[in-house]
Image (tube, rainbow, N blue to C red):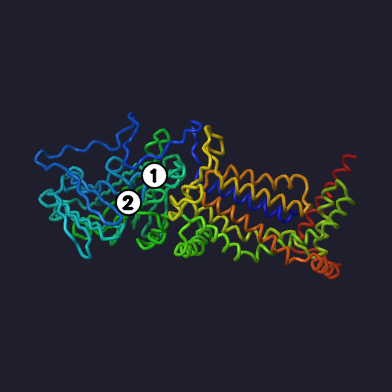
Amino acid sequence: MDKNSATGLFLISALLLVYLFFFSPKKEDVKAPGKTPPPTAATAPATTPAAAPAFAPEAALDTTAAVAKDVAIANENITVTFSTRGGRVAAVRLKKYKTFGGQPLDLFDAKSARMDTRFRTLDGKTIKFSDLVFQSATSQGANGASVITFTAPVAGGSVVQTYTLPQDSYELSYNLRLNGLERSVAQEPLVFTFVDKVRQTEQDLQQNRNHTTINHYLATGDQGSLAEASENPEEFKANGPVKWAAHKHDFFVAGLIADQQPFAGGAFNSTVNLADSSTIKTLSTTLTLPVNEVVQGRGQYRFFFGPNSFNLLKEVAPEFDRNVYLGWGLFRWVNRFVVLPVFHFLEQYITSYGLIIALLVLLIKLVTWPLTYKTYESQARMKVLKPEIDELKAKYGDDATKVQQETMKLYQTFGVSPLSGCVPTLLTLPILFAMFQFFPNAIELRQESFLWAKDLSSYDVFLKLPFYVKWYGDHVSMFTLLMTASTLLMTWQSNQTNTAMQGPMKTYSYLMPIIFLFVLNSFAAGLTWYYFVSNVITFGQQALTKAFVDDTKIRAQLDANKIKNKDKKPSGIQGRIAEAMKAAQEREAQAKKKQS
């Protein structure tokens, strides 16, 4: 590995570590070694007896009111259970998905979540839907949709809530109307609340927690979210109109969208209690509904209860696909317009997601081969110049500054850029960083097995350790080991053929793969499998490229450059580097004079 490649490796590694530190979820501090909490079934009750009650006690109902009961409607995708107390959604089961432990996947139920709505009357009373027991009536709508209507008498009028569940859909239409209450309701917004105690559904509790948040979209076009990885209370208050808000549960989402008039405002907060293993995070959303729209029967809204699938969410509402985190800026662009389309295209013909990832690597390697070839070509030029560089080292001995200065002159003379080897590699960084966000967030990989990995969206457990290793974990990821071993082999092979790099930089080239062995041990198996395959293909590219890189022709080209640049002064970056080195050498000489 020559200095150009080492420089490129150093920059890539530094950028990657910075990216992981600032933009990847922060792992929680594991208190008890080897005691990773097991996945909790979505239908399991809380296991902490001393925990505070999930919700405040409800107000006493009128003794003449009917007994509350549960009613449900369903289609091929979801089962929605309602409580006649409040006429509200009480539970949602996603019929096509299971938890990591094989349990039915309840997005939430009456024990983990609560929705409620309230409004005020002109005489100052607060009417909460949860204080009312509604009468329910089911019917069939257009195209076989299931319709359920809840009605409750209030203050000389009535509250009417109508839910419509189309066939083969994850959306639930919601119409809210206050009938005959025009002269009774106060002219202030209704308040809708949704408290959601999210439970673990995936293998990795840390990832499950760190990918759980509240996203929102304002009428102004601004999209935002609470910090996902924070273990501190997070909150945001939207004083302006809100188009939608969504509770994102790693791979699933529960959202409410305003179809016509936006919500008047909203407040969102999340809290984490690391001592409570039954709840990974508590999410709370408050939205204000324009009273005039509701009174006039124009309170048209939609719930979305379903998977975090990009192609599905982009049809729900503007920017609703932001619930699938694909990175930010350029990295999101690469995932959205390059990686996802190719991935979905391959899905149509291949059933094994491990093979799809391998083919994805191959296609990316083919497209970026021109850049890779430039890097190999730069390495070959440095290899040809090795005798001249060795002479400089022998001539100036331990005077490192002089060696560097003369080396820069040599580069200028032969027309070689010290950055030509790392710049092509840096241009591939957007793809590198994009993959770090794609694999942990792609629901397509959820619970998809390959070889020994049970779930490509989470880490593979080839061996479970009976103890916890700080910064490593309590398991051995074989894909990560294979990736690390292949990277070390690649580094060793490069250092054997390019001996210009010596000292600390040579040691550093072996250190980075070891660091990433720890960093990536708990990352998605799809990611580490991707980079292992990438290394294997790189070996093939190197062997093939050698057949096209002729050292004799390169030597002839460098000699021609030497004649051409004989009297040419250094310019550009090389010139500035040469001047800086010269100034450093002069300062060093002056310092030696003063000491003597």
Q: Residue 178 falls in which quadrant of the image?
A: bottom left
- Residue 49 found in image quarter: top left
Asked whether 587 or 491 is in front, the reply is 491
In the rendered image, the vertical position of residue 413 relative to residue 510, given as above or below: below
Residue name at image x 12 percent, y 40 percent = 62
Q: Give the residue pinned by disc 2.
A: 94
* Image height of 263 relative to 268, above or below: below
Q: Residue 576: horizontal and vertical position, in percent?
A: 76, 59
Apparent side of residue 203 relative to residue 375 in the rendered image (left or right): left
Instruction: List x then y, in percent, for residue 398.
Output: 86, 46
Q: Residues within 10 Å of mark 1 (few under 14, many from 20)?
A: many
In the image, is 224 to the left or to the right of 492?
Answer: left
- Vertical order, 400 against 472 (above or below): below
> Image check: 288 left or right of 352?
left
**Tag 2: Cα neighbours inside 10 Å, few (<14), some, or many (≥20)?**
many
Kindly report the distance in space between the C-alpha atoms of the residues bearing marks 2 and 1: 12 Å
Of residues 582 and 131, which is closer to you in this image? Answer: 131
Q: Which mark is residue 201?
A: 1
**For marks 2 and 1 on the same chain, the one whose residue lies earlier in the sequence:** 2
Q: Amino acid at mark 1?
A: Thr
Residue 395 image offset from top left, x and y in percent: 90, 51
Give whichever of 488, 395 is nearer the camera: 488
- What secondary structure is found at the residue carrying circle 2? strand
What's the residue type where badge 2 is placed? Leu
- Side of 322 where 15 appears, left or right: right
Q: Position of residue 346 (x, y in %)?
A: 48, 63
